[in-house]
Amino acid sequence: MDFLPIILPLIAAGCGAYFGAYLKKSAELRAIEENRKKILETRELVKKIDDRIAADRWYEQRHWQLAKEVVWRGLKQLVAVRRDLIVFKNIKAEADQNPQNMELVEQGEKVARRMSRTLDEMTVTEVMLEVVAGEAIKDRYLEVRALLSDTCLDDDFEISKFQAEYYDVMNGLTTEVRSRLKLKDK
């Protein structure tokens, strides 16, 4: 029985060392598992943020592309009406000097119909401009359209005066487009 006081502390020390090592290793494994979960959560959060940024960029790019298409369509319509207006005014001046020439009258009517169709299409473009390009661009577009419409009704048509006014309002429109669509001068 003399061994009991010696063996008991040795057994207690061995058990203490074993359970101490076990608890230490268990705590390390728990900490590693918690860190792994945090890393996975962080990685998932970063992926969601990346996906959101990509979606936002796609939306911005698509919106810019749509705005560019609508502005381009509007500019083409303005140029078409300007061209038809000048042709119409020239035909009208010639027809006024030669009222018997039915060919001139027919040509004038054809140009007037084409100009009228384009002006009708411009109404849709106005709405789209406000939606995708903003009110400032739409307002500038309407300035140019008003000049064209007023010139259609003006009997005292002077090409040089019209051209000067046209380029002035078109310059305002293109400046607004450059600003809104963030386009740089060449």
Image (cartoon, rainbow, N blue to C red):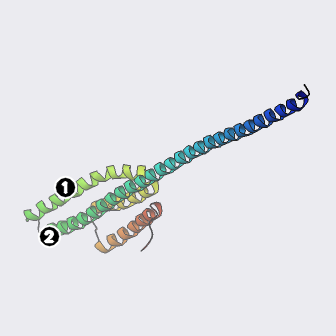
Looking at the image, residue 46 lies above or below residue 181: above
Nearest the camera: 132 or 155? 132
Nearest the camera: 45 or 179? 45
Percent coordinates x, y for residue 62 in the rendering: 40, 53
Q: Residue at x 35, y 62 (%)?
A: 147
Mark whose residue sits in front, 2 or 1: 1
Q: Residue at x 83, y 31 (%)?
A: 12
Crowding at label 1, few (<14), some or many (≥20) Cα neighbours within 10 Å?
few
Q: Which is more N-terminal, label 1 or label 2?
A: 2
Q: Secondary structure at mark 2?
A: helix
In the rendered structure, find residue 113 and report the number of the disc placed on it.
1
The kind of residue tagged 2 is Gln
Percent coordinates x, y for residue 151 in the rendering: 30, 63
Name the quarter where the C terminus is drawn. Answer: bottom left
Percent coordinates x, y for residue 119 in the rendering: 28, 54
Crowding at label 2, few (<14), some or many (≥20) Cα neighbours within 10 Å?
few
Taking 125 as reference, is 1 left or right?
Answer: right
Label 2, label 1: how far apart the Cα atoms are:
22 Å
Tell me the quarter of the picture where residue 2 sits.
top right
In the rendered structure, find residue 97 and report the number of the disc placed on it.
2
Taking 29 as reference, is 92 left or right?
Answer: left
Looking at the image, residue 72 lies above or below residue 49: below
Q: Residue at x 61, y 43 (%)?
A: 36
The kind of residue tagged 1 is Arg
Name the quarter where the N terminus is drawn. Answer: top right
Q: How many marks?
A: 2
Give the residue furthest to the top.
Answer: 1
Tell me the quarter of the picture where residue 111 sits.
bottom left
